[in-house]
Amino acid sequence: MNHFAFRIIKSRTLSFIGILLLFALFLSSCVHKVDVQIPSHLPAPKTTPFDKALSDLGQMSLIYGSDLLKIMASGGLDHTGTAQATGGEIPIDIMPMVISALNSIGGNVYYVPFNPDRLDTFVRLGWTTYNGKHVPHVILSGGITQFDRALNTRGKNINFGVETKPIINSPDWTPGDVVEVEHGWAEKKSLAEITSDFNLSELQQNIGIQGMQTVNSILVSKGVAEEESAFTFFGPTFGFKGTIKKVEGRHGAVRLLVQHSMMQIVGKYFDLPYWNLLEDGQPEPDPFVLKTVKQDFLNLNPLQKTLKTQEWLFIKGYDIDITGQFDDKTLFALKHFDNTYQPVESGIDQNTYWKLYCSIPVNQDSLNRRYLYNQLLEQLITSMQQPQPAVHQEIQQAKPEVQKKKKRAKPLPKKETPPVADTKKEQKEPENKAGSLMENETEETPVYDLLIMIEKKEDVITKEAEAKKNEEW
């Protein structure tokens, strides 16, 4: 009986050894077949969540009738020194990102490059001249001012194992007599913060524009996870280990930071409700824009308040007449827009005007109605210029004054003279491509210029009326 049992154990042991040898041969035969499949990708446009918002900001500048803005950018470097110390963990120069963001806005926003060496070379080659070059209104400066790595680091892990007691009937050829199972899991996460500063300064007066700055930050994460398992069977140990590391792109995060900053600083300069264009961004209105728009409203006279109210109602889609008078159609449209509206002495209160100002939809229909409103307003101003006594008396009482869009570190010149001044020669030169882009700046007469014409003709009408009275007397 004992001899028979020994033969059974021996045969099982030999079978187990044979299986191990076959498994080892199988693994060795697979070594030369190890391969890694790397997916191939074609070039594709780089898109971000701010691409559409930047384009809509340009359309918003047209809908709201903003002035032309020509921006020149400078700086854009990493002021923390991290880029060079870490071998480019963050961009050394973010100016290409700034230029791309400004060019993608469109509308009334133009980027003016600054490269005097290249311009000098082109002039010497005879490709161009110094005349006819556009002079920027403002200078944008800034860059990366803060990078805090490992701002917040957290880790956790789990380990457990099970080991049996020594097995008495274990095979003699095995080095051990226990069976053991172990498993471990670990995770570590860290958080970093990148901050950028940008400021606007006025070119002609060489002074910073109050309130025209942005300081924005973005958080970027990095995480590492490890998991391993091991099995010990009578001595031999088998196991596997997996490690994964995920790092949120620093350069991509900086691009988002730059795009958001350009939206903010251009929106603040134009006093536009740019936050309405952000999908998951700023939920509350910009305090600077809120304060400026409400203060501008208080500085308007009754005629200007009525015209601005009719302007926003008309562009929003209401079928009203541009009369400069708070008529029944205007009153009905305001009540339809805000059922809580209560008429006041000036026609509209400050809070209702603010809600109306921020409610203008940004689409092609609003842009078309902007162009139509400009035509209707010019017709109204033309009719007001007629030397009729009644109209003259209305102008005398209203006296519409020009309200500048920006009251900080301005006025900006409406027409710039080139750096090398010879205006007579400049008029004879053919118009270049850049000049054609700005043709709306010289060909179209702004609405506030038409209002200035009224004030200038007002004195002429007054003198003619007095002369007529003296003649009759």
Image (cartoon, rainbow, N blue to C red):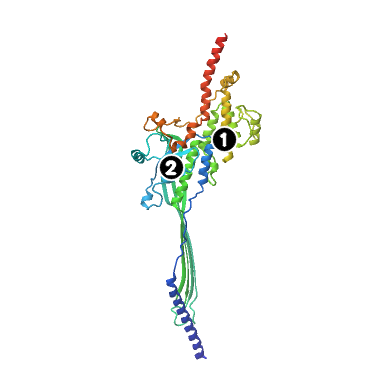
The image shows residue 130 at horizontal and vertical percentages of 37, 35
Spot occupied by residue 358 in the image (x, y as percentages of width and height): 57, 37
Observer able to see residue 361: no
Question: Element type at marker 1?
Answer: helix
- The 10 Å Cα crowd at callout 2, few under 14, some 14 to 19, many 20 or more, is some
Rendered image quadrant of residue 336:
top right
Looking at the picture, does residue 178 appear above or below residue 320? below
Quarter holding the C terminus is: top right
Q: Nearer the viewer, residue 292 or 309?
A: 309
Q: For the residue labelled by badge 2, is the local secondary structure a helix, a strand or a loop? A: strand
Provide the residue designation for mark 2.
197
Above/below status of 408 relative to 10: above
Marks 1 and 2, the one that precedes in the sequence: 2
Q: Residue furthest top?
A: 473
Nearest to the observer: residue 345 or residue 155:
345
- Between label 1 and label 2, give the one nearer the viewer: 1
Spot the residue most to the left.
124
Mark on residue 78? none
Examine the image and state in which quarter residue 417 appears: top left
Neighbour tally class for label 1: few under 14, some 14-19, many 20 plus, Cα within 10 Å: many
Vertical position of residue 7 compared to residue 387: above or below: below
Q: Residue at x 49, y 86 (%)?
A: 11
Identify residue type, mark 1.
Arg
x, y (%) of residue 90? 41, 50
Q: Is residue 62 left or right of residue 196?
A: right
* Amino acid type, callout 2: Asp
Query: How far, Cα to Cα, is label 1 from label 2?
Result: 34 Å
Disc 1 target residue: 370
Q: Is residue 180 above or below residue 173?
A: above
Label pair 1/2, CB-CB below 8 angstroms? no
